[in-house]
Amino acid sequence: MRAHIVTLPGDGVGPEVTAAAVAVLDAVAAHYDHHFHFEEHLIGGCAIDATGEPLPPASLDACKAADAVLLGAVGGPKWSDPNAPVRPEQGLLALRAALGVYANLRPLQVHPALAELSPLKNDKLKNVDVLFVRELTGGAYFGAKTRTIDTAIDECKYTVAEVERVTRRAFQLARERRKHVTSVDKANVLETSRLWRTTVQRVAQEFPDVKLEHQLVDSMAMLLLTQPGKYDVVVTENLFGDILTDEAAALAGSLGLLPSASLGEAKGGLYEPIHGSAPDIAGQGVANPVAAILSTAMLLRHSLGLEEEASTVEAAVADVLERGPHTRDIGGSAGTKEVLDAVLAAIDEHACNAAAFLR
Ligand code: NAD
Ligand code: IPM
Ligand code: MN
């Protein structure tokens, strides 16, 4: 198959992990006889430096035309002055909105070899397999923002249509899994959450085979640590989903492990690790590339429909997590390149075994 993929390496460790992800896609293309064409564009702080804008029109146009977009990370101390007129993160938000990717899938699995890195006791981490579905284009992130000398307002708004579409996506995904949806809100306080809850309840009636449960976000933050094995699909609004998934990353062992896929109705999709630009380790060649590499597996599966290729990448990553090498964030001393090379070698093994099996 032919696919046109736009890469947006961005800032900090973004270019380091994106390069690893592209190398993995190149290896997949070589093994399975696909043709992936990559086109790199600016986003974030580097785009502000080069053009004055965090999402230049050329980047946005390319993303809209692509079969999929692979993003590294944006932001960093250089652009973090709270009084700056423009910020790298605005570019990412504008991109998500323009692509209409309202459903952000963030899977959490705990690899047995890394369980000891988690702050939780090992027995709590058995069978942890959660799919967070974070609403990505609404809520406080996108409401009107106003600021006077002594007052600031971030409007938090949700419409029924916005809640319906992400809820449907979550239930559809749950049908392919363990058929259990947990909807997280703050319906005891927030009006948006009450609209969220009634809408989720109504949509759930379309899926009688899927069990629905509601959880308030504050207790969910606790339950994620005390009973992580209990959850299947967790659907929630934009800000709660952002916070809960960084918490979830601590269960897996590092932020450097969790991938994401952002999907809408149109073709294409946006794929990015859930971590940021990691300014504290940027430029050292030590960033964990696993989250970015696993994001390519999601890209292969969700945008290109290449399930076997996606599984090969995931199996290769699982091998490397099992036997090493590991980057520093997960207790090793390897650099990004060593981990990438090990993943590429494991992809060779898996793809060759699959080819031998077919012969
Ligand atoms: P961060 O995710 O960049 O880093 C948090 C911690 O996790 C740091 O100690 C970092 O070293 C570590 N870490 C993150 N990714 C890692 C990796 N791949 N390998 C090893 N360790 C890793 O969060 P932050 O420091 O709060 O934010 C830094 C900047 O990134 C901010 O400007 C923020 O807005 C931005 N950010 C961007 C995205 C994105 O582009 N999608 C996501 C989150 C944060
Ligand atoms: C993420 C990030 C972004 C978010 C920021 C950088 C806008 O934290 O992708 O999780 O809050 O969505
Ligand atoms: Mn985040």
Image (cartoon, rainbow, N blue to C red):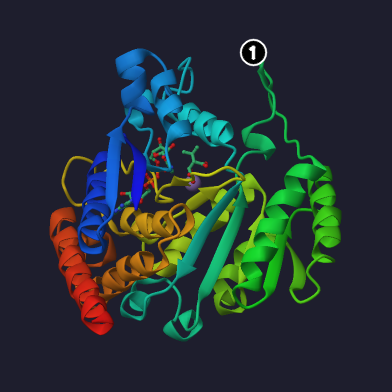
Residue at horizontal 85%, vertical 66%? 205
Visible residue check, residue 220: no
Q: Quadrant of residue 168?
A: bottom right
Residue closest to the far front: 359
On the question of residue 72 being in view, the answer is yes
| Residue occupying image coordinates x 50% and y 32% | 95
Label 1 packing within 10 angstroms: few (<14), some (14-19), many (20+): few
Rendered location of residue 16, percent (x, y): 23, 44
Say which of 110 and 165 sits in front: 165
Quadrant where the image shows the C terminus: bottom left
Mark 1, residue position: 149
Q: Secondary structure at mark 1?
A: loop
Count up the numbered dots. Answer: 1
Q: Residue at x 36, y 55 (%)?
A: 296
Percent across and percent down for residue 283 are: 18, 40
13 left or right, relative to 231: left
Amino acid type, callout 1: Ile
Residue 96 is left or right of residue 166, and the answer is left
Q: Position of residue 317 (x, y in %)?
A: 29, 68
